[in-house]
Each structure stands twice: as C-alpha cells, then as structure tokens.
Image: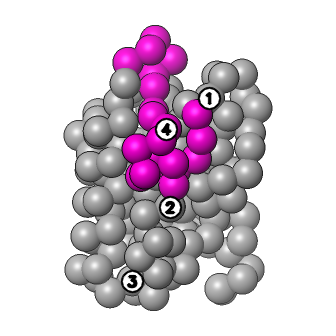
Amino acid sequence: MILVSSCLGGIECRYNGSHAASEKIRKLIEEKQAVMACPELLGGFSTPREPAEIIGGTGEDVLNGCAKIITSSGENVTDLYMKGAAQTLAYAKTINASAVILKENSPSCGSNFIYNGSFSGKKIAGNGVTAALLKQAGYRVISENQLDDIL
Ligand code: SF4
C-alpha cells in the first residue's frame, strides 16, 4: 500500500483550502493501491490556516530542535507539525506502506524542496518535517514530480 498526501488525492486540505490533485494519484486511490493522509490535519490544524515555513533549516533540523516552523504572522507552530509528522509515521506503519508520495515544497510534505522561511516564494533543497521523519524511519519518500520512478 502506498501512502499519499491527501491534497494530491484531491482533498481540499491545503492551507488556503485548495487541493493539488494528480490524476495518477487519484487512480491509485481508486484502485485501492494508495491511501491518503494530511500531516497538518493529523497534527491538529484545520483548513484554511495560515501559511507556515521552516525557519533556520530543514525538516531534519526541526526534528533535532535546531529549527522551528513559524506562520506568516509569527506564531510558532512547530509542536503541531511535529505531532502531524509522528501521526503520519504511525499511519505509515499501520498500513505497512511500501512507498510514500508527498506534495513537494510543503513544510510538512516537501521531499526535495521547501520554502526558505522568508515567505517570499524562494525555495531551498530539503525535506519538510514529515518527509524527514519518514525517511529517517526508512520509508521511500518521493514527490508527485517523481511518480514515474515507481509507477
Ligand atoms: S500537509 Fe501535506 S497533505 Fe496536508 S495539505 Fe499540506 S502538502 Fe497536502
């Protein structure tokens, strides 16, 4: 079973209430080859919510306590992101996930790129906090831009 970001499956759970549906991922869900999870909703957020970015590093740095996640108005929401990552890892274990496909650029789900913490649209190489935790646990994590690697 493949674990996918809920927004890639068409759920309107992004911070601004939109989705990021991928027809290939929707097909995987319809064929019961994939199930969805949204780390930020699992962490306790609702939709819509303020955008947030990792300040001072990457998802690994957040896990190590060396960086934090801040909303655009300055609220420290690191704990909710950490909780969402842990809940997503628990779900991956429950379904015995063979691979994980996460939405690129998110402070939770990015697996190659994340925003740089300046809220200016600039990206840096790195994982979001959920992608980092899943990778540390040994899961194969890719983004929607790498579907051809596994399909
Ligand atoms: S946390 Fe992940 S699944 Fe949820 S909306 Fe953001 S990118 Fe999509």
Q: Which residue is mark 4?
A: 67
Label 3 Cα neighbours within 10 Å, binned few <14 / some 14-19 / many ≥20: some
Hey, what amino acid is under mark 2?
A: Ala
Marks 4 and 2, Cα distance to the nearest angstrom? Answer: 13 Å
Mark closest to the chain's N terminus, 4 or 2: 4
Task: Give the SS element for disc 2.
Answer: helix
- The mark found on residue 141 in the picture is none
The residue mark sitting in front, 1 or 4, is 4
Q: Which residue is mark 2?
A: 132
Hey, what amino acid is under mark 4?
A: Ala
Marks 2 and 3, Cα distance to the nearest angstrom? Answer: 16 Å
Q: Are marks 2 and 1 in contact (CB under 8 Å)?
A: no
- The mark found on residue 97 in the picture is 3
Seen at 38% across and 65% down, the residue is: 36
Hey, what amino acid is under mark 3?
A: Ala
Mark closest to the chain's N terminus, 1 or 3: 3
User: Would residue 26 be seen by someone viewing this image from the given angle?
Assistant: no
> x, y percentage for residue 61?
51, 48
Q: Which residue is mark 1?
A: 117
Splitting the image into 4 quarters, where does residue 56 fall?
Answer: top right
Marks 1 and 3, Cα distance to the nearest angstrom? Answer: 30 Å
Marks 4 and 3, Cα distance to the nearest angstrom? Answer: 28 Å
- Quarter of the image for the C terminus: give it: bottom right
Marks 2 and 1, Cα distance to the nearest angstrom? Answer: 17 Å
Q: Which residues are magenta?
A: 56-75
The residue mark sitting in front, 4 or 2, is 4
Task: Give the SS element for disc 3.
Answer: loop
